[in-house]
Image (spheres, rainbow, N blue to C red):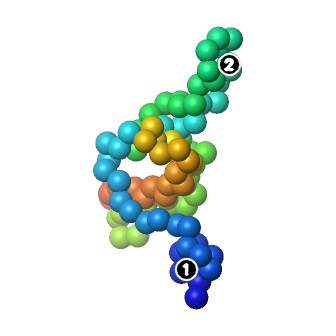
Amino acid sequence: MHCKWCGNAICTCRRSKLRYDAALYFSYDGPYRGKGPHRKYGDKIDYRNLPDKYLVETSVDEYIETCIYQVQALHKDFAQPLNLVIITKTPVHLPT
């Protein structure tokens, strides 16, 4: 039997909800500073201002805009990067 979310015979996916203030970070993409270990953690993820490069899908249904983002995030308590799907819903005010 295959997992209905990831499609694998052995399920490697994990579904859970995170708090809006979870300490999740983008990976660091900047240059090496020349001393010490390489930086691993970049900016903290701001759920209200996610970059458009992570936007996967946008839809509007009955005055509510739904945006789906997919992000590889880092957390200081987990060794592996987390594959996050972030869903935001905002009301849309149409002109009258």
Sequence-earlier tag: 2 or 1:
1
Q: Is residue 86 above or below residue 50?
A: below
Q: Is residue 92 above or below residue 1?
A: above
| The one of 96 and 43 positioned closer to us in this rendering | 43
For disc 1, the neighbor class at 10 Å (few under 14, some 14 to 19, many from 20) is few
Left or right? Give the position of 46 relative to 7: left
Q: Name the secondary structure under disc 1.
A: loop
| The one of 18 and 47 positioned closer to us in this rendering | 18
| The one of 71 and 91 positioned closer to us in this rendering | 71
| The one of 1 and 26 positioned closer to us in this rendering | 1
Q: Is residue 63 above or below residue 53?
A: below
Quarter of the C terminus within the rendering: bottom left
Give the amino acid at mark 1: Cys
**Which mark is on residue 13?**
none
Give the amino acid at mark 2: Tyr
x%, y% of residue 18? 35, 54
Q: Is residue 85 above or below residue 15?
A: above
Q: Quadrant location of residue 27?
A: top right
Residue at image point 47% right, 65% down: 14
The residue wearing badge 2 is: 32
Residue at image point 59% right, 83% down: 2
Q: Quadrant location of residue 56?
A: bottom right
Residue at image point 45% right, 37% down: 76
For disc 2, the neighbor class at 10 Å (few under 14, some 14 to 19, many from 20) is few
Tally the marks. 2
x%, y% of residue 91? 32, 57
The residue wearing badge 1 is: 3
Quarter of the N terminus within the rendering: bottom right
x%, y% of residue 10? 59, 76
